Structure formats: C-alpha cells, structure tokens
Image (spheres, grey):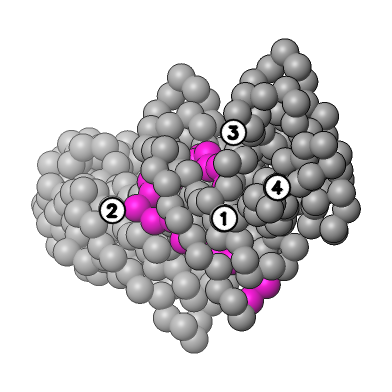
Amino acid sequence: SVSVKSRSETALTLEWNKVNNSNIYSYRLTDYNGINVNISESEGDSVVTHTASALSPGTKYSFTLYTVFEGVESSGYNFSSVTTPSNVHSVSVKSRSETALTLEWNKVNNSTVYSYRLTDYNGININISESEGDSVVTHTVSALAPGTKYSFTLYTVFEGVESSGYNFSSVTTPSNVHSVSVKSRSETALTLEWNKVNNSNVYSYRLTDYNGININISESEGDSVVTQTVSSLSPGTKYSFTLYTVFEGVESSAYNFSSVTTPSNVHSVSVKSRTETALTLEWNKVNNNNVYSYRLTDYNGININISESERDSVVTHTISALSPGTKYSFTLYTVFEGVESSGHTFSNVTIPATVTDLHCKYASGGYGLVLGWGPPVGERMSVLINMKGRIFTASGESLSIGGLQPAQWYTLTVTAESEGIQSLEVSITCQTDPRGERGCICGYSV
C-alpha cells in the first residue's frame, strides 16, 4: 500500500514499505499527468518516501507505482489521494439577532465538491453540506446569548481531508435597556438614568436625540447605573429619544422613549376683580400655548386643576367662599404631561367688609366727638375716617376727635382698609355739644 505521510495544499508526501524489505529494487511513479518519476530507494531505511509537489489545493490525484528490477517492472499499484483544501477567504454575518447568527461565506473555488465543518464556541462540530445551486453557503447558529462574542473555526472538507481551519468571531445583538427614567429635570435639561444591560461593563450606549444627533456614552465601571444629561432644551417641551446598547460595534434594536422638560412659571398673576368673598385671578398663558394646564394650590393646601381655554391667551379663575379683608397666599403651577413648574407664589386680599354699627356722641365741653363702630366681619387692618378732608386712622373700634366747634354738625365718612384695599364707604353725621355739656347720640347714614 501507499500512505500519505503528510499533505498540504500543494504537495503530497507519499510513503510505502520496500518490497520484501529489499534494497535491490527501485520504483517508478507515474503521476496524474502521466509523467514518470524514477525513485531510488534509500539503503538504510525500510520505508521509501517521495513528495509530489506543485499540486492544486483540494484536488484528488491518481498515481501508479511500479516496482523495478533489472529493467523489469511490476504490473503497477494504482492509488489516489487528495491535497488539503483551501480555507474559505472570509466569513460574514448575513443577519444577527439577540440569540442567533446567520453566517455566510463563498464556496471555496466556487466548487460544489467541498463540504464544511464548523466548530462552535462549545467545541461542537456542525457538518454543513453546500447547496449545489448557490455560490454562497449560509448557516445559522442559534440558542445564543444576547450581546456575546463567540469564536468559531470553519474547515473546508474534501474526501475526508480538512483545511487548516479559518478562525473568526462575531457577536450577537445586545439587548435593549429595560427602561429609562428621568433622574432630574429642569426647564432646559433632562438627566436620564438607566440600569446597565445585564449589569455588564462591556457595553456602551448611543443616544440619538430629538435632532437626530448621536451621543456616544461610555459606562462607568464602578456603577450599575448610567446617567446622561441632555441640555440646551426648551422649557415645557416633549422630546423623543432612541437609546441603543452597543457591543463590538453592533447595536441593539433600539429603545424608544420620550420625556418632557419642566414648564416655565407664569410671569405674574393679577386680580381681575375682587369682592368681599371672592377673587377672580388672571394670568397670561405660558408662551401663549394651549398645551399647558395649571394647578392652583390655595391657602388651605387644596389643589385646583385649571384647564385653559383654547380661544383665549388669558386664563381666569375665581376663588370664592373667602372672608372679607383677608390676605390669601397661593401657588400657581404650570402643568405639562404631568410635570409641573417650580411654582409661582403670590398673595392677594379680598375687599374688607363695610364698617357697621356706626355711632357717635359728643364729648363734654362741646369741642369733641367720640365715633364708634362694630367689630369686623372677617379681617381689617385699620379704619379710615374722613372728616372735611382730615383723615384719621384707627385700629380699634372707636376714635376720639378733638378741636371741634361746639354746636356744629360734622359728616364723617368711614372705610375699612386691609393691605391697601378699602371697603365701601359709610357716612354718619354727628353734632358737637351746643351747650358745652354732654349731648345726644346721633344717627348715621350711608
């Protein structure tokens, strides 16, 4: 017999035992081209070796070996063998998912005589028969883990002989993040936060913002959470983003989300009208925009949700069941997509109640009057008395006025005041003592 001691893509080293272990014989090898090669045996060995070179890879060659003695040849021993096939030039990934890789390569020499053996990351061998109609071979490796790098070796196989092996690696698609939350927000920035995928430090991230601009984000090795601040935003605006997990240049399918910046506060709140028991508040819509609503927190901490009117640029709201002359504090929030502004705090007062139970009497001696009135309904800071252009201010429930003329009639106009807001006027006419003695108590008129 003749065996192959070694082979390569371009050579076969043949080996056989000497006939009868005799040194008297020589040999003639007729190769695949009909060329004769005379081979003298080596006297010291019992085995003869010969290398046939300049061959083509992955090819089956036929030979005839003759034993020669004194010019006489044996009938000839016919045998054949194959050279090592070439490796594939490259392997590409036709498609990938989180759990599978579809590999693709061109057939070696575009030949249908070769098959292939793929050794996977677990050392498992997969025999792959080529499809005769195609010049490309495809194979899908499944049951993989997301975002993982796998190594493979691909062998070209011909007549049971394999190539040296083509080594390559590829990665599966990484998983998306599960969710993205807003760690903090302001009118012009959003600080986003998400857990690392699989709590792994091997992944980076790419955030595509509302303008289509890509932001590459490297994770911090010491943390299980990634944070990223997007700035230069507009207040009270909804922004859409796409976040990709990146591994070895391969990106996840994309996690889409949106969030809103904090809306601006109203610039100011004015009182459109007021009564003793109600305040009608008025403010301009923020940015003259109809997408915002408002929340008013009143003096009792009660929340009042206010929907804007689409037709108007101004929002009005009336708060009732109030007490006269009382200062109330409020906070007004602009609301957008459930996110509220920092809050505009303001205060205002209702009209004080009209002063009641006015009464007066003259003082002894005829030169003074004592004016009295009832306790307030609600609150008041002071009572203002106007007598012939002279203004008197009292904080209690009576006022003594001196330096008057005896036996004179005086009209006094009285208003209550609270935080600069005055009640309706009420008047009373009083007479000083015409005799310089104690006098009467007079009536009042409004």
Question: Who comes first in sequence, dot 1 or dot 2?
Answer: 1
From the image, tell me which residue sits under label 2: 297
- Residue 351: x and y, percent? 30, 59
From the image, tell me which residue sits under label 4: 74
- SS assignment at label 4: loop
Q: Give the range drawn in magenta.
A: 134-155
Q: Nearer the viewer, residue 34 or 27?
A: 27
From the image, tell me which residue sits under label 3: 218
Eye-nearest disc, 2 or 3: 3
Q: Is residue 383 left or right of residue 138?
A: left
From the image, tell me which residue sits under label 1: 159
Magenta stretch holds residue 420: no
Question: Who comes first in sequence, dot 3 or dot 1?
Answer: 1
- Tell me what residue is drawn at x 50 percent, y 65 percent: 129
- Residue 358: x and y, percent? 17, 55
Q: Residues within 10 Å of mark 4 (few under 14, many from 20)?
A: few
